Image (spheres, helix red, strand yellow):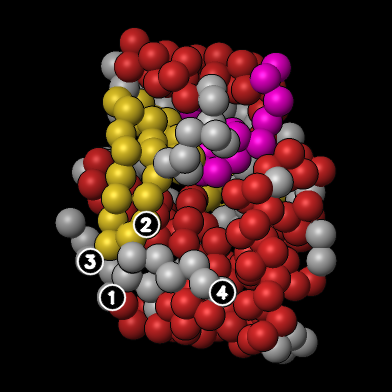
Amino acid sequence: MNERPAAEVEAWYAALEARHLDTLTFTEVRRALQALSSLYVERRDRLGRGAALDGAGKRAAFALFYGPLHFLVVREIVRALHVDPRPRRIVDLGCGTGVAGAAWAIEAGGRPAVSGVDGSGWAIGEAEWNLRTLGVTATLRRGNLVEAPLGAAGEGIVAAYAVNELDDGARAELLRRLLAAHTKGSRVLLVEPIARRPVPFWPVWADAFRAAGGRDDTWRFPAVFPERMKLLDKAAGLDHREMTARSLWLP
């Protein structure tokens, strides 16, 4: 297992803070994070309309909290799955701020290039900055994640916290395409929240992944955050003791 030095993650987070607290105060970001957390828990129907990123405060809160949180979660899942060998490239579907593809690329060693697609222009810009800052080569574009090219042998495909925001028809098509890509030699990793409400599709997808030789896991990891992220977490009243997620994996 390759240990990523805590100092390197701290340095990335410090650069994130400098980037996003240039025009906003810590208090403004804390309030926005509280609103964003409430949106994810209580008003998920608004996510499909872009409510999570509908203001500078929420965008900064996402970048400073949920982006790093998702990076740390995906990193731990990749470590726990002992993903090997290194993918030729990593396709990040619904890449958001680029952290899932970055986490896999860094843990893979040699930092394979990431190809990312997302529907948000802001997210693509943030992903470009994150991947560059983390030393990962990337090609990113704005578009529909369901239509992204897939299926090259030796490719890694990750979809983290994205499938839950698709409608039923798009999800069914994406599942078909992911299973087809696996038959051509791709490895597929899906990551979603542990709560059942956001992921009613999970039993069907889990059955399909297991039937194709994959696995379905639920994870709980200690919440080891950069110090300033820990401060934001506590100030917003979230105060994580652990990081949780569920994953589907097709090796």
Q: Tell me if 93 is positioned left or right of 10 in this view.
A: right
Task: Using the image, determine if residue 37 lies above or below residue 150.
Answer: below
Earlier sequence position, callout 3 versus callout 4: 3
Q: Are marks 3 and 4 in contact (CB under 8 Å)?
A: no
Evaluate whether residue 104 shows in this view: no
Q: Nearer the viewer, residue 120 or 191?
A: 191
Evaluate whether residue 170 shows in this view: yes
Q: Residue at x 60, y 49 (%)?
A: 41
Q: Which residue is mark 1?
A: 5
Q: Is residue 158 magenta?
A: yes
Earlier sequence position, callout 1 versus callout 4: 1
Distance, label 3 to label 1, CA atoms, is: 6 Å
Distance, label 3 to label 4, CA atoms, is: 29 Å
Q: Which residue is mark 3?
A: 3
- Outermost residue, left direction? 1
Residue 112 place in picture, x, y as percent = 42, 51
Residue 66 place in picture, x, y as percent = 55, 61
Magenta region: 151-169
